[in-house]
Image (cartoon, rainbow, N blue to C red):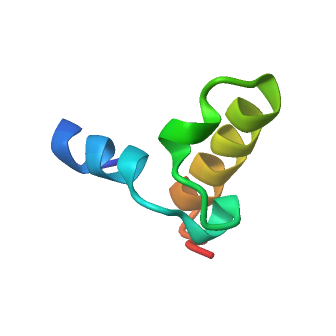
Amino acid sequence: MFEDADIAREWLHCEAPALSDSRPLDLLGSSRGRQAIREALGKIECGEFS
């Protein structure tokens, strides 16, 4: 989905609107956070960037 690993790493460290402006990296520690990341990635894969 991301063009290369550097873009993916950058996404992990940036605030994401789809995650209530949280950084994906900060959400990895809980199952609820990981589910939110999976949902956000699914939206990105389908072209929905909000």
Q: Does residue 50 show up?
A: yes
Residue 22 drawn at (x, y percent)? 60, 57
The residue lying at 65 percent from left, 23 percent from top is 29
Residue 13 drawn at (x, y percent)? 37, 49
Q: Front-most of 46 and 39?
A: 39
Q: Front-most of 46 and 14?
A: 14
Q: Front-most of 19 and 46?
A: 19
The residue lying at 60 percent from left, 71 percent from top is 17
The residue lying at 41 percent from left, 44 percent from top is 12
Outermost residue to the bottom: 50
Q: Front-most of 46 and 20?
A: 20
Outermost residue to the right: 32
Q: Does residue 1 show up?
A: no
Location of the C terminus by quadrant is bottom right
Residue 27 drawn at (x, y percent)? 63, 37
2 left or right of 17 in image:
left
Q: Is residue 16 above or below residue 7?
A: below
Q: Is residue 35 above or below residue 2?
A: above
14 left or right of 27 in image:
left
The residue lying at 64 percent from left, 59 percent from top is 43
